[in-house]
Amino acid sequence: MAKTKVPAIDDWFRMDFAEPQLLGSRCTECGTYFFPKESHFCRNPNCSGTNFEEAPLSPRGKLWSFTNNCYPPPKPYMAPDPFVPYIVAAVELEREKMVVLGQVEASVKINELSAGMDMELYLETLFEDDDNEYIVWKWRPVA
Ligand SMILES: [Zn+2]
């Protein structure tokens, strides 16, 4: 029987496999974007804004940095057991120019990556249990 696909983290991204988007927030005063969402005080030191609107973020960006992760991440991040090493990418979003971390699609090898390349958001299973597949955003090179 097919397992139900559910987000590994609620409300951090749109569960749309064709057009996934991270869900950040934007200060209505100064326009600064935040991811994960900021909802109390604007972290821009020159702004006293306290109002935020939900902001779907660019699904594309430039690869800024990347590394191999050979150790399970600390809580609250969840990792499959047994642990499988993965690549972490820092991608500068096309429009917001903010850097968002994420795993790289499992089939991508580290020697296929180079700084500055175009990356796109992609939804993939992070881990599963008897009932569900837990989905998270990942980055992959634009084909
Ligand atoms: Zn602000």
Image: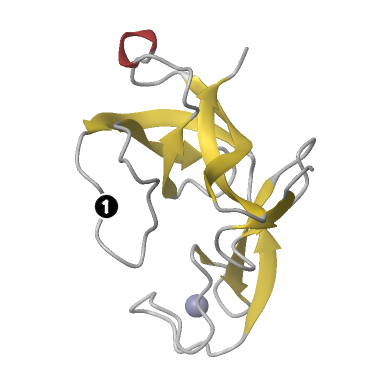
Q: Quadrant of residue 92?
A: top left
- Considering only vertical position in the picture, is 38 above or below 132? below
x then y, percent, for residue 9: 55, 63
- Considering only vertical position in the picture, is 35 above or below 27? above
Would you say 88 lies left or right of 49 here? left
> Element under label 1?
loop
Give the residue type at disc 1. Answer: Pro
- Considering only vertical position in the picture, is 10 above or below 91? below
Asked if residue 85 shows in the view, the reply is yes
Check disc 1: other Cα within 10 Å, few if <14, some if 14-19, many if 20+.
few
x then y, percent, for residue 91: 43, 37
> How many numbered marks have been drawn onto this rendered protein structure?
1
Asked if residue 14 shows in the view, the reply is no
The structure residue drawn at horizontal position 44% and vertical position 50%, both measured from the top left corner, is 98
Give the residue pinned by disc 1.
73
Would you say 122 lies left or right of 63 here? right
The structure residue drawn at horizontal position 59% and vertical position 44%, both measured from the top left corner, is 95
Q: Is 7 in front, or is 20? A: 7
- Give the colour scheme shown: secondary structure
x then y, percent, for residue 121: 60, 36
Q: Which image quarter holds the C terminus?
A: top right
Q: Is 127 in front, or is 37? A: 127
Would you say 90 lies left or right of 68 here? right
The structure residue drawn at horizontal position 78% and vertical position 46%, both measured from the top left corner, is 16
The structure residue drawn at horizontal position 35% and vertical position 67%, both measured from the top left corner, is 76
Q: Which image quarter holds the N terminus?
A: top right
